[in-house]
Amino acid sequence: MSARMLVAGLGALALLVTGCGGSAPMGAGGAAAGRDEGPVKIGALHPVSGSNAVDGLQMRRGAQLAVDAINAAGGIKSLGGRKVELVTGDTQGKADIGQSEAQRLISAGAVSLVGTYQSAVSTNVAVVAERNRVPFVMDVTASDAIFSHGYQYSFRVQPGSKAIATAAAQYLKAVSDQAGKPVRKVAFLHEQSDFGSGAADAFTAAAKQLGIGIGPNISYDATTVSDLTAQITQVKASGADVLAVAGYYRDSLLAAKAIASVKPGLNAVWGVSNGAYDQPKFVADAAALGNLYFSTNYHYDATNPETVALREKYQKLYGDPMRTGAVLSYDAVQVIAHGVEQAASTDPQKVRDAIAAAQVSPLTVGRGQIQFAPNGDNRNAFPVLMQVRDGRVQQVYPPEKAESRPDYRVAWRP
Amino acid sequence: MTELDTGAPVVPETAPPDQKIKADRGFLGRAGIVAAVLVVAIVLALVQSGSGLVVWQSVVTGILTGGLYGLIAMGLTLIFGVLDIVNFAHGAFLTVAMFLSFGMIQATGLHPYLTLIAAVPVLFLLGAAVHRGLLSGKGGGSLENQLLITLGLSLLLENGLLMFFGAEPKTIDLPGDFQFPLLGAVVAGSRLYAFLGAIVLGGLLYWLLRRTRLGTAIRAVAANAPGAALVGINVRRMHTLTFAIGTACAGAAAVLAGPLVTVTPTLGEQFNITAFVVVVLGGMGNVVGALVGGLLIGLVEQLTTIYLGGQSSLLGVFVVFVLVLFLRPQGLFGRRA
């Protein structure tokens, strides 16, 4: 018995010692040393396990593809062709894990961070980045709150929640007028957390300015909801002519099923930063149900040949269609590499200044090159209107980014 | 202590008739009160929303969804009633069965409901193995250990599924799914099937527990394990069997619920909380109570969204939960099967 305890104790001790041995050099003083030699490290933080693992993995691969592309083109030229290396962390979709992983990557010598897909996680990582004076370029992060704190080291490539919702209202007005069926009243169905409610509030504000009526405003709990038929019946009873939906994948699919069975008298179903209606997966899962659904969101630029080539490469390598999130990660890593190139240094503060002044052509839809406003938000981020047509998601508005013209109607009414 | 199907142990078949009548009256009284409260709640909802159609659709949806909740909670309540195990892995078992069903449909193109023939036995065996291997030994002796084991198991199963199948959400299509109007409300065929399945499963379990030798043995073990052992019942085997039957119920529930949900490895979490509330509401260990509790929770969820609009429907569920715990800790139907 005592022998066994001794062995166990020794085992525990050994674990402790090696554990400390591993982490000590990272924590103390090793940071600068790690940056000056070997490859230039970029830290990628995504949720590659947990319920968002599909998107997290997509985005990590997107970042890796960008790194591969940079290395294939000769690495960082201003540093004598030093290679770039992606060091990765798994946030598990949790804010606290994201925070500790961010710290770990910075200690491991990352010159900049890219991530994180979820606003709550990005909020925590932004604090770590600020404290360590390491730039943090967000690929997907909807919340606008992070950019109201005066942070110096936070940047974002995608359009924010408010920008998307405002554009959604403007596009709705324009497209419905064009079709000769001007929108009168919009019912808004949204999940109840910051993401859905924020989108609903911003959309309502923009719609009021355009003279569009809003109501009813219906929310639900995305984590537990298992049927939305009663909510869609409420929409039907209200006489609204457009239904806007801001939700995640699973609940938006439920909404589509409920719409198909209740058949409310709508002219259009209008996704606002919707997590489903612009996904190829949704088109496959919902089949005929989702036909002609609209969605306003950030999107990879389907009209850009470079994007098309990148997505083909991804499809060939991983057997999955590349999602917009992954293309945004690709863009974000390009921004960081550009920053390192311009700074000709791996000092995070110099890289930060170079990123703040950077101009990089995106592979996602933008108004122009990626350029950051003083608060760190991408000045030229630009949401686009998409529609499910002929079994795939197509860009339909504004005209300069359109693959085809919007078809303003719903599938179940003539 | 345990109250599985407690009609028998607490008011045994041999009880004096007046005592049994009293128990019946108490049960009817409670059912009456619940029904009256429900009617008031529905009338209030009507006043609040001002649209009969919306409220009617909510009631229909609530009952159909409630059947699904009852279906999922049945296995859980059985395990709880007989073994006193709070089985946090129930949701994970449900998910495993759903992936099994999904995998079979993908591989063989079977009708979704036909996968019952595989899902139920496989889950039965899985449950038996888990009980024999993890829970019935020394390690599963204390309540804390059982909690940790089932919780750990659910994490293991979830992440195993994640590794094996990936997190990409999957859907199960029901061939020939239809919907029909019911006095203006829409009823989807797949939901109706799940609801009917819940009633059939509830009936089967009731029959098993009340009308068969096995059921009598299970109830005896639940009521008094040492006593049951004295009359020659193998208590450990009964425990394993009950646990296996409970997980087999999760298998059946998964197949019936498959076409209604998006299948992801973390699906179990979505139902775990609701299932526990239903179990407590219906009286722990009471299979028919679980069905009624499920219907109530389904209705409460739907009505809450009418009353409170933007609030989470879970708010209403937990208000009811706390009220029931306060007024009647043994559950609404805790003394009657």
Image: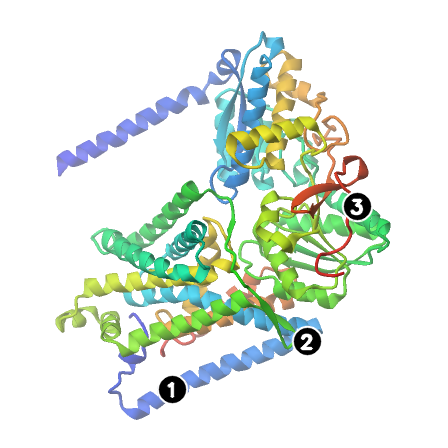
Instruction: Tell me the crowding category of disc 2: few under 14, some 14 to 19, or many 20 or more residues within 10 angstroms, Cα based.
Output: some
Residues under labels 1 and 2: Cα distance? 35 Å
In-image side of B31 versus A306 (left or right): left
Name which residue type carries label 2.
Answer: Gly
Looking at the figure, which quarter contains the C terminus of chain A? bottom right
Which residue is situated farthest in the top direction here?
A80
Residue B163 on image: x %, y %: 41, 40
The residue drawn where x is 71% and y is 29% is A304
Residues under labels 3 and 1: Cα distance? 64 Å
| Residues behind callouts 3 and 2 on a single chain | no
The residue drawn where x is 48% and y is 49% is B264
Return the mark for residue A171.
3
Closest to the camera, between mark 3 and mark 2, is 3
Quarter of the figure with residue B277: bottom left
The residue drawn where x is 61% and y is 10% is A77
Return the mark for residue B24.
1
Note whether residue B159 is visible: yes
Instruction: Tell me the crowding category of disc 1: few under 14, some 14 to 19, or many 20 or more residues within 10 angstroms, Cα based.
Output: some
In-image side of B128 versus A321 (left or right): left
Tell me whether circle 3 and circle 1 mark residues in contact (CB < 8 Å).
no
Q: Chain of mark 3?
A: A
Foreground pick, B143 / A328: A328
